[in-house]
Image: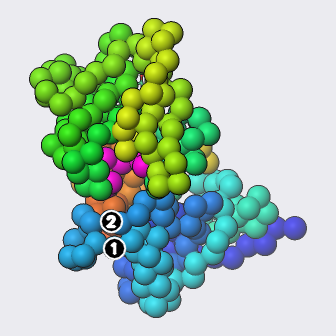
Amino acid sequence: MENTEKIKVLIIGSGPAGYTAAVYAARASLKPVLYTGSQPGGQLTTTNDVENFPGYPEGINGPQMMMDLQKQAERFGTKVHFAQITAVDFSSYPLKVTVDGKQVLEAESVIVATGASAKYLGIPSETTFANRGVSACAVCDGFFYRGKEVAVVGAGDSAAEESTYLSKLCTKVHLLVRRGEMRASKIMQERVKNTPNIQIHWNTQTEEIVGDEHGVTGVRINTNGESRVIPVQGFFLAIGHKPNTEVFQGQLDLDEAGYIKVMPGSTKTNVEGVFAAGDVADRIYRQAVTAAGTGCMSALDAEKFLAAQEMELAHQ
Ligand code: NDP
């Protein structure tokens, strides 16, 4: 049987965007209800130290930061549920979302902050060495590889940008390109090609990441059928991200890569009362601090929307 419960602000996602939206909505007495999804805390729980979030001069451990954000959101009255939103129906108002395929909730506004996930190659050693030499974010983790040799896999703008970024910190960057050309923009390719400590390995597949109990020691690559191990201490994935928007297909306007489209300068989606914040609507910046920023914006947008709804009702 259907169980319905009406909520003023329902937040989907528990990364910096979701929790920041919760802090703002809770402090505006909107009693937000937040559903964490399958990875409570989001992408930051897969990283070690976060040293680029303002306000932490000594850096902060990623999972710790997310627990702190959760506590901060709860302190002001956010209800956090460790469950998954499995379906939404935004075709009528109030908005409807289904939790774990069972419970249907009604909400006056919804903030989507489901994030994005880095794409992985699908080889077992990626998981074995996760957080021990394998990373999907050079800006987050590159610092830990100062003075070391690393590999980057990918051939798009992200791979070009991450290789260039790492080349300033590392002794050498091996860029592993699976075809004989790169997809990255010309200017970014030129930058990579003109950086002396970046070596491009064309027509190269990553076979396996190798290492020991301390972490990554190398990567086994295959170039034109020839297999060999190159010594690296860090292995960076830059083969793209996938926004977590499966559940919103057909409900919200998405761009060609699946990111939620928002009105420029706001977090408004094409559906009234539905807002999007963080990486799910951002294919460019993808930083914790930018996610927190748009999370704040989404709560303010939701608050304004709800106030306008109330005014409208009062005048009816
Ligand atoms: P892209 O989808 O553009 O590129 C992914 C790259 O990864 C491709 O070159 C692809 O190779 C390669 N790849 C995919 N799977 C594998 C695999 N299994 N093994 C080896 N290589 C693989 O993703 P990006 O993240 O680079 O960019 C996403 C979007 O963000 C783009 O629109 C980009 O322009 C934009 N962006 C812009 C930036 C900027 O302007 N500063 C910075 C970063 C991103 P192949 O080419 O063979 O398919």
Instruction: Determine the CA span between mark 2 and mark 1.
Output: 5 Å
Measured from the top left, where is residue 274 in percent x and y? 47, 59
Give SS at disc 2. Answer: strand
Q: Report the image quarter containing ligand 1.
A: top left
Q: Which residues are magenta?
A: 133-141
Q: Residue furthest right?
A: 1
Which residue position holds label 2?
A: 50
Among the 4 quarters of the image, the one containing residue 89: bottom right
Horizontal and vertical percent position of residue 225: 51, 9
Asked if one can make out residue 191 in the rendered structure from this viewpoint, the answer is no
- Please check the rendered image and state whether residue 57 is part of the magenta-colored stretch, yes or no: no
Indicate how the structure is coloured in the image: rainbow
Image quadrant in which you'd find residue 216: top left
Asked if the residues shown at circle 2 and circle 1 are in contact, with their CB atoms under 8 angstroms apart, the answer is: yes
Instruction: Tell me: residue 114, above or below residue 180.
Output: below
Q: Earlier in the sequence, mark 2 or mark 1?
A: 2
Residue at 18%, 31% in the rendered image:
197
Left or right: where 117 falls relative to 202: right
Above or below, 245 relative to 94: above
On the picture, is 110 further left or further right than 291? Answer: right
**Image quadrant where residue 198 sits:** top left
Disc 1: which residue: 60
